[in-house]
Image (cartoon, grey):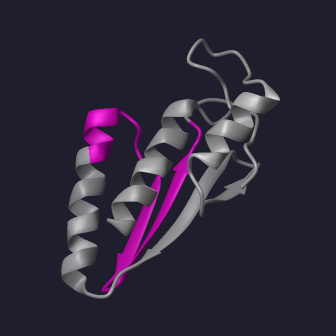
Amino acid sequence: MQALNPTTPSGNPATASEATALAAAAPGWSCSERPPSLFRRFEFASYAQTRAFLDRLAELQESSGVTAQNINFGRTYVNVTLSAMGAALSPAEYALAAELGRLATA
């Protein structure tokens, strides 16, 4: 995954190495430049696993202050889109993406 000119916590553009590190921490996500966003589809074996993931996603959004702009799901899948809250993706959006990836494989 290629980082899309993320910003640092101070609001300054991230350096190339910072952007690469952010993207590497959230593997499996697709990037879009317009608008700056991350997308991933998560597949599960049962509805119970899907429901547990959705519940944990809600908890993570509450605790992080980062909200997925688009979540849709079926019995055994969840599609998540994280869009930039500003002009570029922030470390917080990449951190939520990485945490969701870890959660889905736990």
Q: What x and y, as percent, mark residue 75?
A: 30, 86
Q: Is residue 63 visible?
A: yes
Q: Look at the picture and state if 38 lies above or below 96.
A: below
Q: Residue furthest right?
A: 16
**Can residue 22 be found in the magenta stretch?**
no
Q: Is residue 97 left or right of residue 73?
A: right
Q: What x and y, as percent, mark residue 11?
A: 63, 16
* Residue 19 location, quadrant: top right
Residue in the picture at 24% in, 56% down: 56
Q: Look at the picture and state if 60 lies above or below 64.
A: below
Q: Is residue 75 left or right of residue 43?
A: left
Residue in the picture at 22% in, 72% down: 51
* Start-end of magenta stretch: 60-84
Q: What x and y, as percent, mark residue 98?
A: 48, 49
Q: Look at the picture and state if 58 lies above or below 28.
A: above
Q: Look at the picture and state if 18 lies above or below 52.
A: above
**Can residue 73 be found in the magenta stretch?**
yes
Q: Nearer the viewer, residue 62 or 35?
A: 62
Q: Is residue 68 visible?
A: no
Residue in the picture at 62% in, 21% down: 8
Q: What x and y, as percent, mark residue 7?
A: 66, 25
Instruction: For the N terminus, give its image quadrant.
Output: bottom right
Q: Residue furthest top?
A: 10
* Residue 39 location, quadrant: bottom right
Residue in the picture at 76% in, 50% down: 2
